[in-house]
Amino acid sequence: MIRLFFITISLLFTSLCFSQINEGLTPKERAYLFHIVKKSPILNNNLGRFFDYQGPDIRFPNKKINYDSVELLIINQPELLIIRKEEIAKSSKGLLAEAANKMALWELNKILLAKRDSEKELKQYKNKYGKFEKYLLEKLPPSMTKKVDEKTVPIPKINALLNPSLTFDDKYMFLQSLRLPTVNDELLTLEAINYAINRYVEERSFEIFKVLGGKADDYKNVLTAAGDGSSTTGMLEEREKNERGIWNKGLPKAVGLFPYQVKIVEKEHQKKRRNPEKIVEPMRYSILDFETTGKNRYTNIHLDVWGYNSEKQTTVVIEKNGLSYHLFGSTDTRFLSPDSSFSGSKTFQNIINDLEFNKIAKLEEMISGKKGFDYWIKHYQKKKDQTELKIEKNEKAYSDLGYSPITTKKKAPKRVKRSKKKAIKQGKQSFDGMPKTYSGKKQKRKRTGGIKVGSNR
């Protein structure tokens, strides 16, 4: 099993293993595909030469090609565009999947906009919208559906939620205005929309993938987003960067078609209340599990990053059999690399390394190192214990003094007699030589660093 973790990212995942099926494209689909490839820097660099447009050169006043007008020409005159499918089929299967995914998204974008516009506009996409709506109804809660002629359909207000241009925050704000019975209904509604988008795009992109010459036994296409739900550079600006970091006009704004994994949380400022209000929030990262193709066949993973957060580095972690492979996004292009400095000095991995090996390591050394705080705490604790023991011994000695018998010998000790004789020889007139009084206690000597004890004789 492969597990992917996505942090601050909007991404396409495609897992592939190959077999051959061939189908054709309508004139409109051929025009869309040409438009998509030419507007996407990566696809144009790798596949653009296989699209031979033989119509008039239509440009804006700034000399850039007007692909919208070229698209209309190709739809009305299909012979103006020659697509070399045989050459396209030889390209990287990941690139074919990326082109197919973008075309499926482009198509879904037009379908949902047509649904919001009028039934007349939707007529040309009626069957495809019917398929999308079928997937939507599989997961929608009852509060978001109604009966029409004994048929269950989504309530009309859901059309606003399906606007491909809405960010997550805008979408959820509108969802709250619907006053659904529970916060769980809000969660289920968002998950239903996510499911329908991914299910439709996966099936449609696989069809297009096969038309382009791709061969697959197993095909998995997943759209996912991670972050705080706000706008993301790239998707919201309708632009993509090429390998030189130059912005290029990309697909229509599709920020609303990238699903966030969501969860129910308590409002931050109400957590201490007895019954805090609960809301739905996007996950700051997404986790997806996939099965490899198996039977010693290759499983290709193609990551297509669409949106970047200008302040946080896009990070992808691929985990398999307990091993992790880290990929980091560039701030200048939409590429991923195992080099954590790929995006410059300020990266998530650099911050983690700086914390682990510099800031935290220094604090660890100060606390638990050879001469750290832990060492000195133990050292002075030992000294304190030793001092307390000495105090206790002396306190006991002084205490015992009052309860021990004191005896006085009848005769003075020899040293007293010697002192007396010495005093007489020196001509001293008097000498106070007293018999020895013995308490049985040791005499305290002068201290030179510690407590030394001796005994009287």
Image (cartoon, grey):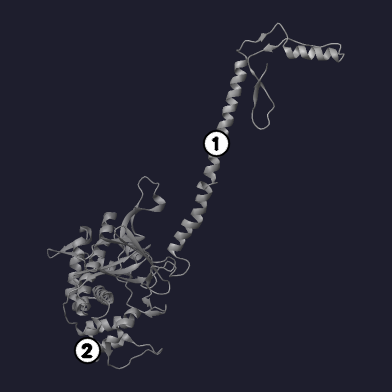
Which quarter of the picture shows residue 176? bottom left
Within 10 Å of disc 2 (Cα), the crowding (few <14, some 14-19, many 20+) is some
Viewer-nearest residue: 184 or 107 = 107
Task: Report the side of 136 relative to 311 (left or right).
Answer: left
- Which quarter of the rendered picture does the N terminus lie within? bottom left
**Can the viewer see residue 274?**
yes
Q: Position of residue 353 (x, y in %)?
A: 46, 60
Which quarter of the picture shows residue 114? bottom left
- Which quarter of the rendered picture does the C terminus lie within? top right
How far apart marks 1 and 2 lie (CA) works out to 89 Å
* Amino acid marked by disc 1: Gln
Look at mark 2 in the image and give the residue it sits on.
78
The answer to whether residue 152 is above or below residue 23 is: above
Q: Position of residue 338 (x, y in %)?
A: 38, 67
Mark closest to the chain's N terminus, 1 or 2:
2
Secondary structure under tag 1 reads helix
Q: Position of residue 70 (x, y in %)?
A: 29, 88
Secondary structure under tag 2 reads helix
Viewer-nearest residue: 173 or 57 = 57
Viewer-nearest residue: 272 or 391 = 391
Look at mark 1 in the image and give the residue it sits on.
381
